[in-house]
Amino acid sequence: MFCFLIAAAIKGLSNYTQNILLIITIILGVLHFTFEIRQLIYSPLSWITDIWNYFDMGAILFSVTTSIVWLQSSAMPVWAVTISILLLEFKFTTFFRAIEFGGTHWAMIIGVIQNSLSFFVIIGFILFAFAHSLYILLRPTNDNLNNSQELNTNMFANLDTALLAVYMMLTGNSFSVSNWSLAENITLTILIILFSFFTTIYLMNLFIGLLSNFIGETNKKELFLLQRAKILSEIELFYMLPYQRRKNNWFPEFIFSLDKLYEVVSKIKNNNWDDDIEKPLLPSTLLKIIQFYDKTNYFDYTILG
């Protein structure tokens, strides 16, 4: 990542230095691409359903492809470099997933996205419906097809720009419909009122409420620990050599969250186990490992052993 950023951001580099940096980017990118392919082969469904893999693959493919084109043409493809830098720097921020400093918030962000995916799909269909309707209503007539000014200023001349115009309306920017008089176009007025009520007012406030409920009900620490365990398992499976995977001091067979374990032991000790599942039997070895103390009195492990 840093090789590509240096080559793209620093002006005045010699062609030799720039080419070396781009070649290193290609080599490292191909290496990371093989890791992604291994993950895909190992568990295709898990790879497809994990949103992080798309960011990783996009950052790898864009940077490698851009580096190859750059080397061949000796000219920097500005648009490709722009997207590559965006993806690479975004990928850099995802490294904080594995540390508690930013991992809890990353876990919460991804949890919100996963739980709101169906809501986003519904909003997408609604936006497309309004964009298609406005495109049919406001597209240039046959008399105006040769009018270049009309085509340049009317965002509803094409369906793709109509989608962009409707998205801008969702954010509160109604400039795209300012060229038409609402008093003379009743259909347009009705569509704008319906759009502003169902999307900007109702759906957006509903979405904010759903987010608030999810954040309030989510155990961020638990999501972070699950995320960290998943990252460790990926490192063990796809980035380590066979002899490294067998090192128990690197990758233990079990990973426990002590906070949750303390809570379970405390419930069992105080006879407060009221969960739906049967009360577990904790081995004395595990209890000795965590060195559980009940405030001032030492807890007798043999009772639960």
Image: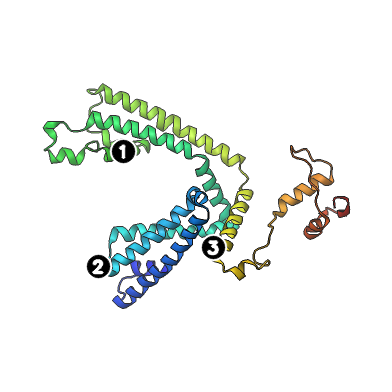
User: The residue under label 2 is which amino acid type?
Assistant: Ser
**Residue 261 placement (x, y as % from top left):** 74, 51
The tag earlier along the polypeptide, 1 or 2, is 2
Q: Is residue 207 visible?
A: yes
Q: Quadrant of the N terminus?
A: bottom left
Label 1 SS? helix
On residue 73, the disc is 2
Q: Residue at x 60, y 56 (%)?
A: 228
Q: Residue at x 35, y 75 (%)?
A: 20
Q: Which residue bears the numbered disc 1?
A: 163
User: The residue under label 1 is which amino acid type?
Assistant: Leu
**Residue 126 placement (x, y as % from top left):** 38, 32
The tag earlier along the polypeptide, 3 or 2, is 2
The tag earlier along the polypeptide, 1 or 3, is 1
Q: How far apart are labels 3 and 2 at the CA level?
A: 35 Å
**Residue 60 placement (x, y as % from top left):** 41, 61
